[in-house]
Amino acid sequence: MRLVPAPEAPGRALLLPFGPEVGAAAFRRGDAAIVVFDAAAPLDLGALAGDPLFGAAEAWTSGDATVLRLRLAAPARLVPRPAPDRGGWLVEARPEGLPGLRVLVPEAEPEPPRLVIRAARPGRAVVLADPATGAPLLVGTVREGGQALLLARRGAQFDLLPSALGAVVLARSDALVLRAGPDRFTLSAAGGAALILGEAWRTPPLAAEAAAMSRVLDLRPAGGPTLAARLRDLRGAIAAAPPLARAPLRREATETLLALGLAPEAQAMASLAFQEAPQARDDPRLLLAHGAAALLAGRIAEAAPALEDHRLPETDETLLWRGLLAAARDGAAEAAPALAATAPLLLTYPEALRARLLAPAAEALIEAGGAPALALARRLLEGDEAAPGLALARARLAEAEGRVEEALAGYDAVARGRDRLARARAIRRAVELRLATGALDAAGAAAALEAALYAWRGDALEREARMRLAALKRQAGDAEGAFVLLQEVEAQSPADAAALRPLLREALLEAMAKVPPLAAVALADARRDLLPEAGEEGVAAVTLLADRLVALDLTERAAGLLHEAAAGSATPAARAALGTRLAALRLREGDAAGALAALEETAAEPLPAPLATEREVLRARALARRGDRDAAAALLRGLGAAGAAPLAELLAEAEDWPGAAAALAAHLAATLPASPAPLAPEHRRALARLAAFAALAGDEARLAALRADYGARMRDGPLAETFAMLTADPPRGLADLPRLQRELELIRALPSRLEALRTGAPVTR
């Protein structure tokens, strides 16, 4: 055991040598923080003597458990978490709230009566004596950190205590038993006794369930006129009171404004209280009201410090507002546990405030998913039928429960309403649902979403809509439209420009490949800053632009682009790839010397085998074009099977038919699929070409071998008749004269047919 630096908080932590199979729990009793490990191991605390924080710690073993106790002023607590990289458990003293929690929520099961607390990696259940009362404590440990039970619950036979880790039950009945299962703790009664849960533990109407929850704020469920009259009285009292005595009155005025749904005014009232009386910052009611008002006003950055302040008591209402903050800031997954435990409180709030909060709470539960969350969302939405603004949430619930037609009808009804924000969200959700169910394809979804693009403007919702529309346009094949949309997002959100660049680059390259050449060149000229400059992506971009320039007969401009890009390439492989493309372009234009020069200027070692082979083939073709056929042939022979096909082409141009046939046969031996696999079009062309070379060379043995090996596979399909005539038996009598006439006509046409086969053009019979 030793003191080590705390890894996630300022200060130090205590490292205890318990292995990963040991579970822990942590909670407060009175003025002390207590940590329990479910393994008995005496701890020597002598090394902590004199430490200002842990020097007063006490440790003892109780049965099969080890207990660590430290007097610590509230609300600070000891928070253990496993640290396998350090070989034990770290115990930190945290002065503030617990970050990154999974909130444990108790669930009552009626048959047989028992209480279930689901947890990740439960440890064991151990029994201790409560230091405060001497009563038995049933402690459920866990082997994974960040699982807290924040809210206390009181029953006839037991109290469920708040914890920083694990589950803690104060037992008042000797029959109670806490058991650990694979994914839960179960509290039940043994020996024939029954666990008494009472109505608050069952599933009562939400209002009755909320009545048992702990609160901080005084949000009276009064009508609007009553609250307005109360606000007038408070304003008069504030004006008449001395400045330092106004804080309690301003707190009540803040709560009244909040109850009326006047969030900015409530936040301003709380801020005045803080300015006039510094001690007001320690008032939990005012602090929570200030954070709630800022959250309701949409000022999340101002709400977070107040709602996460350690001076707030751990009550149901505190947890509710923290859940609403998580829903607004982090998303439904983080908010759902807190909202699932406390959402019934919303139904006890005044109507104006309830109308502002029910929809976001219900939608967060729906988005989180899962049967319990959806069931609670349904109860919330059914429990206040008259509340305005819930139509969108009800449609989302119908979608989550698979009632597609009902959901679409709900979205369409909201889309016809006058609430612009709800209308924009409903239109977009309806489009996504129709896309998911096949009622719309990507192009139809893009058209529908584009028509509603301006239903709501100016915030993150519009940005998300434009990003989604761009994705749909790319999916529908409109890469240019997607690129234009992304440029608009870039112009509207300069802070997001860096994050948008990869998407812009992908859309630009896709658009350049699909639009007409002139439009592609214009796009590239307009946004040269988006073209990648390095690696395979850069080579592909420059090659694409060069192809588009060649399509416009701007060959010299394409060559200049390739030359410039090759000279500026960061890697030898990229430079060699661009030089290869430049050499192919020069050779296509008949400039053999230029092709050889491009290959020499971009030479590099080592290169990937396919690229190296492609460069040698280009070099051989350039040498042949310059008249040095012997050197070209020798170069291609040195490539082995990889150079056989271009060697056959070179020898055929020189009318060396036996050599061309031998080279093409070597190429086919390395590339043809084994029988009975079907032949690809390129293999059919190569076999027909080989038969022609053998016929011109008079090589009857090769023709017979071709007929025997490939006659059946070439019987049907393109070039079948040509192959059959070329490889047929020689004429042996008068009956073969018609076939001989057809073969003579075929031989006369061989030069043009060979050219067609070489270029891959269509061949007629």
Image (cartoon, grey):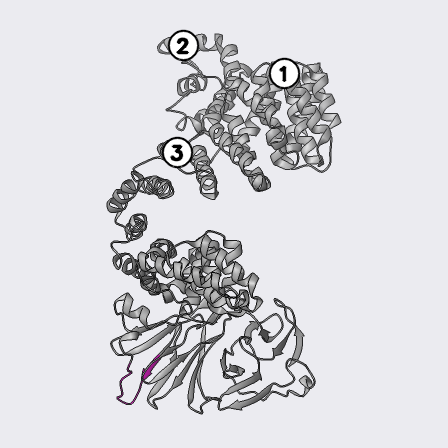
Q: Residue 236: x, y in percent?
A: 43, 60
Q: Residue at x 38, y 86 (%)?
A: 171
Mark drawn on residue 742: 2
Name the chief secondary structure element in magenta.
Answer: loop
In magenta stretch: residue 193: yes
Q: Is residue 79 left or right of residue 162?
A: right
Counting residues from the start of the chain, the first of labels 1 and 2 encountered is: 1
Circle 3: residue type: Ala
Mark drawn on residue 744: none
Q: Residue at x 28, y 66 (%)?
A: 206
Counting residues from the start of the chain, the first of labels 1 and 3 encountered is: 3
User: For the residues marked 1 and 3, what is the alpha-carbon distance in whole angstroms?
Assistant: 38 Å
Do the residues bearing badges 2 and 3 touch, measured as CB atoms within 8 Å?
Answer: no
Tell how many labels.
3
Circle 2: residue type: Arg
In magenta stretch: residue 689: no
* Magenta span: 187-196
> What SS does tag 2 mark?
helix
Q: Give the camera-side residue of 97 and 243.
A: 243
Residue at mark 1: 555
Q: Residue 525: x, y in percent?
A: 61, 23
Looking at the rendering, in which quadrant would you find the C terminus? top left
Q: Is residue 751 left or right of residue 735?
A: right
User: For the residues marked 1 and 2, what is the alpha-carbon distance in whole angstroms?
Assistant: 44 Å
Q: Is residue 382 left or right of residue 423?
A: left
Q: Residue at x 55, y 72 (%)?
A: 82
Residue at mark 3: 446
Looking at the rendering, in which quadrant would you find the N terminus? bottom right
